Amino acid sequence: MFVLDRVTKNLVAAQIPFGTEVSVIDHVVGITNVRNAGAAFGFAPAGATLFLVASVVVWIGLVAYVARNPIGEWSGVVLGLILGGTMGNGYDRIVHGTVTDFINFHFWPVFNVADAAISIGVVLMIAGYLLRRNPAG
């Protein structure tokens, strides 16, 4: 996930001038080169340092958890999505001070591959927890 995030952000930075958009599906989806100092989807834009620290804490926590606990394939995928996404955005914060966002569904805040990976990983983690907690429905 980290590599896919880096490749897509680099392509956007190289091909689309900052602050502009290339329409993919007219008035529905675009690729917009913007910077985000806050959390995923542009939330809390003033917390760049806080989110960098949070990224490092998540990296360390996930790596420590996996090192101490045997995990199954499903858990590995879920934790890999979260870790890869966190590393992608953390890398941007360390190197650039902001995160490059570019996927623009005009009804949702602009985001990137790392944001999507983290969000999908968290949703799958919660779903897995709920399903294990109440397997009979």
Image (spheres, grey):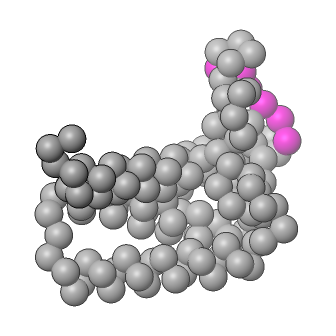
| Quarter of the image where one finds residue 92 | bottom right
Nearer to us in this view, 129 or 77 = 129
Residue 21 belongs to the span the image colors magenta: yes
Quarter in which the C terminus is drawn: top left
Quarter in which the N terminus is drawn: bottom left
Q: Is residue 112 left or right of residue 75?
A: right
| Quarter of the image where one finds residue 52 | bottom right
Q: Is residue 110 left or right of residue 73?
A: right
Furthest-top residue in this view: 26
Q: Residue at x 68, y 18 (%)?
A: 28
Is residue 132 visible in this depiction of the protein? yes
Residue 87 rendering spot, x and y as whole percentages: 50, 68
Residue 114 rendering spot, x and y as whole percentages: 53, 54
Residue 136 rendering spot, x and y as whole percentages: 14, 44
Nearer to us in this view, 84 or 69 = 69
Q: How many marks?
A: 0
Q: Residue at x 66, y 23 (%)?
A: 29
| Quarter of the image where one finds residue 61 | bottom left
Is residue 14 visible in this depiction of the protein? no
Residue 56 rendering spot, x and y as whole percentages: 54, 81
Residue 60 belongs to the span the image colors magenta: no
Q: Which range is magenta?
A: 19-24
Q: Is residue 42 left or right of residue 60?
A: right
